[in-house]
Image: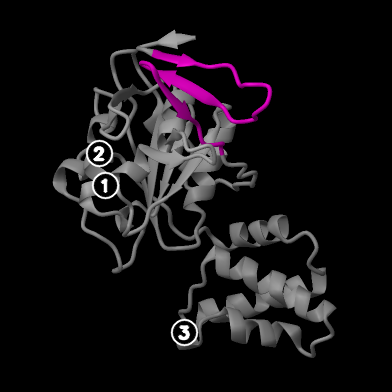
Amino acid sequence: MVQLGVKLAETRRESPINRVDVSGVDLVLAAPDQHDVEWLDFDHCVQRLEAAWLRLSPKEPPLNPRVIGEPGLGKTTLACAVARKLGQPVYIFQCTMDTRPEDLIVTPVLTPDRRVEYHASSVVSAMLTGGIAVLDEGNRMPERAWASLAPLMDDRRYVESSIASVKIPAHPKFRMCVTMNQDASVYELPGYIQSRLKPRIEIVAPPWEMQEQILRLKCPQVDAELLAGVFKLLKSRVKRGLHDSTRDMLSLAQYAQKLEISGVNDPLKRAAEQVLEKSRE
């Protein structure tokens, strides 16, 4: 398949690495993530994310939603679940305060035989294969890194690599979203980036009935009696105004079960002391 100067190269028999030729530049692609997890939908989260990625016409670019919520609510899980529903590979890029523009696009790598290979980032790999790129915790990334993605998030739909001296267009099926935590240890996004990251899809804590379903689904090996104790403890914390994330709940149940198997007395109490934040007790 050839499209806008991009040609998918056949994988060489001696190497499992996928390569793509972009205007004469050989790029080594990153492998997609195998994030095979279940998402129990509530508040029409799946529907809202799918709608953002829908294209009404070939001329209209898809939107680049930002999925916002407190840590541990499943923002990345939601994006991966929708990608799997759409039948597209998912590529997760973990954003940090040290992320450089080249980290998001192409990085040169010296091989053992002293050749220079150009390795595409997970974002560029998603662009070239028609996958879905998830920029996890995007508001931890500095502006200079975001600037390199600006043309990708409007109707231009490309990025440029100064290192490889090549312009890389996105596959028509390529989609992108950004997850963001609601906390203070983040950068303020510049206006020209915020205007490109629309719509804002906010994830809130699911209702308690849904929380129980999630725990039972994610913790099939936890004893029913111990799981009932977990539910009772978490509900008592809610009555005191303490709200634990879904990730905290899963960690509590799983760790309590492991302590019980290890012969620890009162495993749920011990697990709560080590998993749930003491400052919130």
Q: Earlier in the sequence, mark 3 or mark 2?
A: 2
Q: Which residues are magenta?
A: 6-32
Residue 22, compared with residue 189, is above or below; it is above
- 202 or 134: nearer the eye? 134
Q: Where does label 2 land, which residue?
A: 148
The answer to whether marks 2 and 1 mark residues whose Cβ atoms lie closer than 8 Å is yes
Residue 42 visible within the image? no
Q: Amino acid at mark 3?
A: Arg
Residue 7, compared with residue 15, is above or below; it is above
Classify 10 Å Cα crowding around label 2: few (below 14), some (14-19), many (20 and above).
some
Disc 3 from disc 2: Cα separation: 40 Å
Left or right: where 73 falls relative to 160: right
Where residue 221 sits in the image (x, y, percent)? 80, 63
The residue located at (61%, 60%) in the rendering is 209
Disc 2 from disc 1: Cα separation: 6 Å
- 224 or 167: nearer the eye? 167
Q: Where does label 3 land, which residue?
A: 280
- The kind of secondary structure element at disc 1 is helix
- The kind of secondary structure element at disc 2 is loop
* Quarter occupied by residue 13: top right
Residue 209, compared with residue 62, is above or below; it is below
Q: Which mark is residue 186?
A: none
Q: Amino acid at mark 2?
A: Ser
Residue 22 visible within the image? yes
Q: Amino acid at mark 1?
A: Ala
Q: Which mark is residue 145?
A: 1
